[in-house]
Image: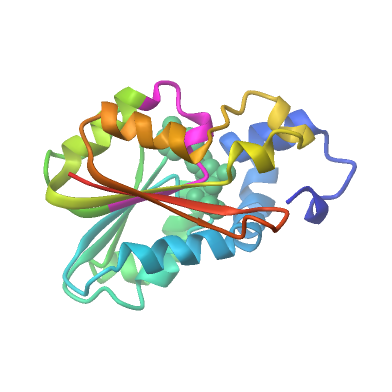
């Protein structure tokens, strides 16, 4: 990822922008940067989520919104909700998906994974890609996700593994890195069932790990 960011950008600044895109840099640069750099892991996540036309789906920390774009190809009477605690990303998504929002197929909210702005048991599926590194309390947040999922609903947490991330300079600034098994244990602790790990691109510079669970 660092290879597509100009080298003059300090690592701490980049880490802060990855955590919560903000200001002019967040507004004009981060959305496209995230969409490009994370295209594959987001594509794999949507594929494994197996979105149906009638599903109500939530993406937490949608960033540039590449998942929303992809899920829109399938959604018919269902709806895609995106929540993010970056005002820059929320504003950008509201502009980008204006027509789909007007058509009632997309809804974009400002909010934190630790306190989701939704009623209980309303989503068929939830995904979150490259965000758990930044969560204040992962167990509380996973319980919060479980609260908004319907019984039988599905969650995918997608990450780059700690093995691949631990030596990158920008991850030295307030990233909490996880091995796939760490996420599995957290999911068990939060009451999720049928947990499986799909680990792709182990030999590439950046891997894609999708941890899948049911309520
Ligand atoms: C590294 S970006 C990943 C964006 C996108 N999911 C992707 O894979 O390209 C992290 C995103 O998650 C959001 N985020 C981080 N922590 C969050 C939290 N606690 N609640 C909601 N959104 C969060 C950030 O604002 C940012 O848009």
Task: Give me the residue at 12% from left, 39% from top.
Answer: 120
* Left or right of 180, for residue 15: right
| Range shown magenta | 126-138
Tell me: residue 116, above or below residue 196. above
Where residue 189 sits, quadrant-wise, is top left
* Left or right of 80, for residue 18: right
Which of the two residues, 76 or 134, is positioned nearer the viewer here?
134
> Residue 19: image x %, image y %?
58, 35
Tell me the quadrant of the picture where the C terminus can be found.
top left
Which of the two residues, 39 or 152, is positioned nearer the viewer here?
152
Magenta-colored stretch includes residue 132: yes
Tell me: residue 49, above or below residue 144. below
Task: Give me the residue at 27% from left, 32% from top.
Answer: 188
* Left or right of 200, for residue 109: left
Task: Give me the residue at 64% from left, 44% from top.
Answer: 26
> Residue 119: image x %, image y %?
13, 39
Query: Can residue 160 be seen here?
Result: yes
Where residue 204 sits, quadrant-wise, is bottom right
Where residue 48 sits, quadrant-wise, is bottom left
């Amino acid at each position: 990822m660092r290879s597509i960011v100009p080298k003059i950008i300090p690592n701490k600044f980049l880490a802060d922008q990855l955590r919560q895109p903000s200001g002019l840099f967040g507004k004009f640069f981060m959305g496209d940067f995230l969409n490009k750099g994370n295209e594959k892991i987001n594509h794999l996540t949507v594929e494994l989520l197996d979105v149906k036309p009638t599903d109500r789906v939530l993406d937490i920390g949608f960033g540039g919104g590449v998942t929303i774009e992809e899920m829109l190809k399938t959604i018919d009477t269902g709806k895609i909700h995106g929540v993010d605690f970056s005002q820059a990303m929320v504003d950008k998504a509201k502009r980008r998906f204006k027509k789909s929002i007007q058509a009632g197929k997309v809804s974009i909210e400002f909010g934190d994974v630790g306190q989701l702005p939704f009623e209980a048991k309303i989503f068929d599926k939830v995904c979150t890609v490259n965000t758990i590194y930044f969560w204040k309390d992962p167990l509380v947040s996973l319980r919060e996700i479980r609260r908004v999922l319907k019984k039988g609903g599905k969650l995918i947490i997608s990450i780059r593994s700690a093995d691949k991330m631990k030596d990158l300079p920008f991850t030295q600034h307030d990233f909490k890195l996880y091995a796939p098994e760490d996420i599995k244990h957290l999911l068990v602790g939060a009451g999720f069932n049928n947990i499986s790990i799909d680990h792709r691109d182990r030999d590439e510079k950046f891997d894609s790990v999708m941890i899948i669970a049911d309520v």
